[in-house]
Amino acid sequence: MQGVEASWRSVVLLLLGLKASPCRPQDSLPECICASDILSCTDANLTGPPSEMPVSTVTLDLSHNRLQQLEGGGFEELYRLETLRLSHNQVSAVHPGAFRNTSRLRHLDLSSNQLRALEHHFFLDVPMLEELLLFDNRIVRVESRAFAGLGGLKKVYLSHNLLTDFPFFSLHSQPHLSTFDLSSNRLNRLPLQDIADLPTALQRNLYLHNNSLVCECAMFSLFRVWERQGFPSMTDFRKDHVCLVFAIPRGTVRFFQHDRYFEKCDVTSIQQEGNVSVTTGGRLLLHCVTSLARRQLTFHWVSPRQEYVVPPGNNGTMRMFPNGSLEISKARSNDSGLYWCLSLDSEQRRNESHEVNVTVLPLQDDLSEPFNTGFTTLLGCVVSLVVVLMYLYLTPCRCPACLKTPSPVTATPNEALIGSAQSSILTPTPPTTTEGPGRKVSTNNKHVVFLEPIREQQNGRLRAATGGHLGPGLLSGAEQQTKNRPDAPAMLP
């Protein structure tokens, strides 16, 4: 019995093997190549799918042909089909039922065709579809239910088309979608609210570069946040992100390389800290961080002084921007305290609050002491210099009492010597000669203080200084004292 049962099993397996045998070249497929479960009919000048195809085909390649339409039931015999390549054809229409009985289809390539729209009936028969290639077409419209029912969809490529908008909200029903490429289209504005509600895994690989986006702060804020978080959609194509300045077609700017256009945006950053500090007189920008969508949001702030602030701000030092940011232009000590912001969504009747604690630090006092010390030192030097210049260049008082000369008769030798010394030191009038007889000093009214009298010898005798400061009795008295000294040297005649 066991032998008979084994024989029957062998027969059954043989019959199944014959039924699911690999495709063989047939007379009806002269231009196709069969390799196991792969049927390749590329560049065969076909205008439609082959009439007879092996039912065991898992991968069918009809690329580089002349297919113009996909009729209903064209692939219904290929119930094992998982990969269908129809790229580089002229397909402009997909009729209902075109993918009937291909429920196992996972990869569909319709790139480089002439499709102009994606309608809701295109992919109803392929619920297990995971990868959809639609780039390099002429698509200008995508219906909101075009991807309805594709619960296993993971990757969609719609780049190089003519889309001016896209229903991003339709992607919320795709739990496994991780890559969506909308680059190189004609998108001019993004529904940031719908994009912000997308799963983070999809935002990481949502490619929007090389579009006709208008430069605006909200868009720049979203992309900047993605860049800081290292999303591949930003970091891998950083140079390809452009926007139009003032919506002028030729006024494109690569805003990740040249972001000076957005310097005054004061965009909101999700990295806003709960405690911030600023020095007195400094500028501070507070962001109203919220997880609500930003299309219909309104914001207002309450300061520590219980002041209600809304755009454009108060008449003092606070300024508020439409995106919810609050600017304190010149911080003061009484600006310290707790600020809280309320964001309100009027459509969904939701609100969120955010608090920021601000500390205004006083200016550093260590800079004032060096300044005072240096100023005092400089002032002292200037005063000393002025006093010296006054002493050197200002003529002493020439009062009549000062000009009287002492009487030579009553003056004693000692008194005459003391007066002569004081006169020689303090007199502003130079002597008539300095080096020898007959040599006069310039009379250009220069005032010079002489520290000691000039003595000159004439025939071995001291010559009396002229000018009325030394009396004649001074030298005669000195000469007389010299003669009377026992140890005095002999005077030559």
Image (cartoon, grey):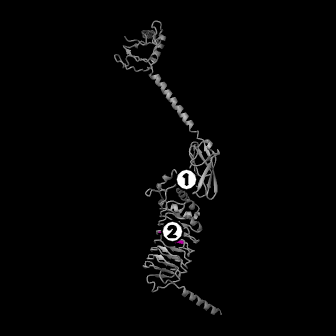
Task: Pick out the residue farthest to the left.
Answer: 438
Q: Quadrant of the C terminus?
A: top left
Q: Name the mark on residue 157.
A: 2
| Crowd around label 1: few <14 · some 14–19 · many ≥20 (10 Å) | many
First to last magenta residue range = 131-135
Amino acid at dot 1: Val
* Outermost residue, top side: 409
Earlier residue among tags 2 and 1: 2
User: Can residue 421 be seen from the camera position used here?
Assistant: no
Residue denoted by label 1: 267
Element on which disc 1 rests: loop
Q: Is residue 285 above or below residue 427?
A: below
Check if residue 481 falls in the magenta segment: no
Q: Main secondary structure of the magenta part?
A: strand
Any part of residue 156 in sight: yes
- 70 shown above or below 488: below
Observer-nearest of 53 and 478 = 53
In the image, 488 versus 405, the foreground residue is: 405
Q: Position of residue 387 (x, y in %)?
A: 49, 24
Q: Quadrant of the N terminus?
A: bottom right
Disc 2 residue type (three-letter): Tyr
Query: Which dot marks residue 155?
Result: none
User: How far apart in space, not on screen, are marks 2 and 1 (Cα)?
Assistant: 31 Å
Q: Residue at x 52, y 62 (%)?
A: 233
Expressed as whole percent of the image width and height from the top left, the position of residue 415 reads 49, 11
Give the residue drawn at x 62%, y 54%. 344
Residue 427 on image: x %, y %: 44, 17
